[in-house]
Image (cartoon, grey):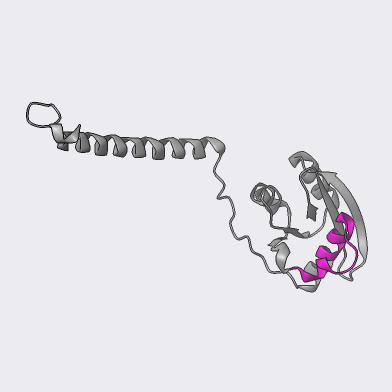
């Protein structure tokens, strides 16, 4: 699979290396799952690591036999010859079939929802603000005399 923001180019090969399907689909979760379910085989998939790979990995993993997320910088064969989404998808499928790809993504179900992330951020921010305020109060207390006024040396 060759991923882009709006589309995914897919090339599927059988065990002998014969191209059995080539397609371009949208990146909606329902479209991806519908495509995978239509294949009805033991699926061994690969895709290159990119910013949004985590959600795609979590989406597809339960529906495939093997899912390899590889480092695009280490796929030297993709740099040779003609370039194009379909061509890249075919080359990735061939590299996977030959066992030439190493997985760089090992996490499953570790994604936090946006709500959980926001909650963690708010707690962290609140703790930081409390620490800053406590530090400010301490620093202010050091700058006042027993009557609560600032000594002339601090003005």
Region in magenta? 75-93
In this rendering, position of residue 127 left or right of residue 47: left
Quarter of the image for residue 101 reads bottom right
Percent coordinates x, y for residue 97 in the rendering: 81, 69
**Left or right, residue 70 beside residue 42:** left
Closest to the observer, 87 or 80: 80
Give the residue displayed 89% in from the left and 68% down from the top.
Answer: 81
Left-right relation of 145 to 112 = left
| Residue 17 horizontal/vertical position (percent) | 89, 69
At 69% from the left edge and 63% from the top edge, which residue is drawn?
71
- In the rendered view, tell whether residue 3 sits above or below residue 147: below
| Most common SS among magenta residues | helix
Q: In which quarter of the image is the N terminus?
A: bottom right
Please check the rendered image and state whether residue 51 is part of the magenta-colored stretch, yes or no. no
In the rendered view, tell whether residue 84 sits above or below residue 94. Answer: above
Give me the residue at 68% from left, 69% from top: 102
Instruction: Name the one closer to the observer, 27 or 58.
Output: 27
Q: Position of residue 40 (x, y in %)?
A: 83, 53
* Residue 127, placed above or below residue 4: above
Question: Percent position (x, y) of residue 155?
Answer: 20, 31
Nearer to me, 154 or 55 = 154
Q: Residue furthest left?
A: 146
């Amino acid at each position: 699979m060759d991923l882009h923001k709006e589309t995914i180019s897919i090339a599927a090969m059988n065990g002998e290396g014969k191209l059995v399907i080539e397609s371009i689909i949208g990146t909606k979760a329902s479209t991806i799952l519908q495509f995978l379910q239509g294949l009805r085989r033991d699926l061994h998939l690969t895709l290159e690591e990119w910013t949004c790979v985590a959600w795609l990995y979590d989406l597809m993993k339960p529906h495939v036999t093997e899912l390899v997320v590889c480092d695009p910088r280490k796929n030297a064969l993709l740099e040779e010859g003609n370039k194009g989404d379909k061509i890249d998808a075919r080359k990735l499928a061939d590299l996977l079939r030959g066992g030439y790809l190493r997985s760089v993504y090992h996490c499953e179900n570790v994604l936090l929802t946006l709500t959980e992330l926001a909650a963690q951020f708010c707690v962290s921010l609140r703790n930081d603000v409390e620490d800053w305020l406590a530090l400010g109060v301490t620093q202010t207390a050091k700058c006042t005399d027993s009557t609560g006024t600032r000594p002339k040396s601090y003005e």
